[in-house]
Image (spheres, helix red, strand yellow):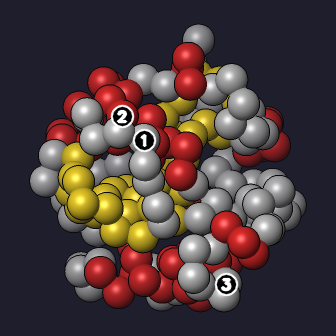
Amino acid sequence: MASKLPDYLALNLRVIICGTAAGKTSASLGHYYAGTGNLFWTYLYRSGITSEPLFPSMDGRVLEFGVGLTDLAKKVAASSDLGLRRHYDVEAFVVKIERYQPNWLAFHGKEAAKAVSRALGRGGDVSLGEQAWSVGDAGVFVLPSASGSNRDASRLEGKTDRVEWFKELGARLPPTA
């Protein structure tokens, strides 16, 4: 089975952002974070990670801003993380990150980060923000999900808005080349 969404990757990116799997809407439209309630693209722009607003249909343009996109489960689409673990290909993901050598690896949501952390022998205790572990030479940062189904403010771990976590990541990234 082919990937639900293509990887947008290049060598030495500022950050590669990794989700768990393409959402069903994203997979059907062929673009990352395309669900109507998903604010991912808004947060990328409001945080300064991209210098202009992008939309799902423009997802391939992230490379212009030194940003890459991928998912841990490439061959399925799901609108929740329930039952996804058996589809994660952590070994191939780690090889991919080591090959492309980004400055940072950001997980979009905790579930993918937990799976990679466990596979690297770091346990599954993951919080939002910078992590004490790395993948290859890339620093690891965990962002809250921007999905419309993840609006509970109690999940923000001390921040008042999800965009604050995106801004914190953006402050760590090298400038766009």
Which residue sits at x=24%, y=80%? 174
Q: Contact (CB < 8 A) between labels 3 and 2?
A: no
Q: From the viewer's perspective, is residue 62 above or below residue 83?
A: below
Q: Which mark is residue 62?
A: none
Pointer 3: what residue? 161
Q: Position of residue 60 (x, y in %)?
A: 52, 56
Nearer mark to the viewer, of 3 and 2: 2
Q: Which mark is residue 118?
A: 2
Quarter location, residue 169: bottom left
Other-residue count near label 2 (Cα within 10 Å), few / some / many at <14 / 14–19 / ≥20? some
Between residue 142 and residue 71, name the one nearer to us: 142
Name the kind of residue labelled 3 in the image.
Asp
Residue that lies at the very extreme toward the right in this rendered image: 36
Q: Position of residue 63 (x, y in %)?
A: 40, 62
Name the kind of residue labelled 2 in the image.
Arg
Q: Position of residue 163 (x, y in %)?
A: 60, 82
Q: Is residue 135 left or right of residue 52?
A: left
Residue that lies at the very extreme toward the top in this rendered image: 1
Report if residue 55 is visible in the image. Answer: no
Q: Contact (CB < 8 A) between labels 1 and 2?
A: yes
